Amino acid sequence: MLFGERSEKIEKVLKGTDRAAKGKKTSEHQDKPKGHGRKSADEYTGADKVDVAHPDLKPGDRCPGCLKGKVYELNTPQTVVRITGKPPLHATVYTMQRLRCNLCGEIFKATPPEGIGDDKYDAASGAIIALLKYGSGMPFNRIEQLQASLGVPLAASTQWEIVEQVADRIFPAYLELNYQAAQGDVVHDDDTTAKILELMKKNNEQDSSERKGIFTTGILSRAKDRKIALFYTGRKHAGENLADLLQQRQSDRSPPIQMCDALSRNTSEAFRKILANCLAHGRRKFVEVAPNFPQQCRYVIETLAKIYKYDQMAKEQNMSADQRLRFHQSKSGPLMEDLETWLNDQLDQKKVEPNSGLGQAISYMLNHWQPLTLFLRVPKAPLDNHYASYCTS
């Protein structure tokens, strides 16, 4: 992992096996996808749309070619895309004429164009700064340099003030999102490290017993077809942040399904939940030791691949939560039972050294078997925590 995560796709993990060879042979003979990588005009959803009428003809006019028929409009017009460059924040300077009477000295000023407003920075400018900074990770000082080089200067300090004003306006929406997220049927949570200079400075002043780590917790709440992603950065772990959030949960609602990896800090006894652990985390432990134990890891990885295939089939067929549960119980249940038996046999019959990499991977799966297989017992239970992983990646 020193130079970045390697691919965990089954063809890469099991490279050199018969399965990988077959997969490679099949892919080599597949037809190349059509097209040349060009994007269609429909994909430019943020572009200005300009309708251009024919300069000489309209539907119903006589055909100038054969002079007999009449022209009609095709359902699919020709499209031409033209892209122009401009600074992320563009400025318009309005120069309004001023006139003075040469006798009385009174000054008459031109009226500003209608619709330009009284604020120097409009709401869209605050939104684009926030997207650049927090959506794309572009520091304020780098945005300042970019704007200056394009002739529309914007100081980093000014950017902060603009974004803060935008945040203040939408803060009520943030509070409502917290409340709605607390009512979710399934909640995913995960942590990643973060840096806050103010908190880092306090680390040297704190007692050794006090927590010094800084974390960003990503929580994704799902209810029906709605997903709400929330982020909290500070000293608290994911379990503590989730406990704070679920204090807003309505008392008459049943406990949510909590999906997380098996780290103790990702959950808390402060709230009721139905715990599910991430199957992908369990799989990853076998991926990491696959080069040293190829045959054993191949069995585990290929078994889990079938489970994921069944889950994808359930999604493609738009199964309800209960239908998906019964489908997994009939298809995935026997596979997981066989896998559990195999895992126990490896340790009980001393086929694997418990302290080896494979032994530790097996122990992890067995120690967390119940939450790892919740999808076989509870409707809506997910297989893994990829939603929260995307949030914190």
Image: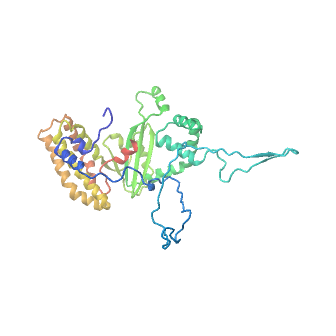
- Residue 297 shows up from this direction: yes
In the image, 117 versus 276, the foreground residue is: 117
Q: Position of residue 42 (x, y in %)?
A: 45, 56
How is the structure coloured here? rainbow
Image quadrant for the N terminus? Answer: top left
Instruction: Look at 52% across and 56% down and name the residue there.
Output: 49
Instruction: Look at 37% across and 56% down and name the residue there.
Output: 254
Left or right, 97 with reference to 294? right
In the image, 206 versus 339, the foreground residue is: 339
- Residue 377 shows up from this direction: no
How many labels were placed on the picture?
A: 0
Instruction: Look at 43% across and 27% down and name the residue there.
Output: 207
In the image, 210 versus 98, the foreground residue is: 98
Query: What residue occupies the far bottom of the structure in this picture?
Result: 68
Is residue 253 positioned above or below 282 on the image?
below
Q: Position of residue 12 (x, y in %)?
A: 24, 42
Left or right, 253 with reference to 322? right
Q: Position of residue 164 (x, y in %)?
A: 56, 42
Left or right, 184 with reference to 366? right
Give the image quarter of residue 267: top left
In the image, 94 versus 70, the foreground residue is: 70
Image quadrant for the C terminus? Answer: top left
Query: What residue occupies the far top of the structure in this picture?
Result: 204
Is residue 75 positioned above or below 371 on the image?
below
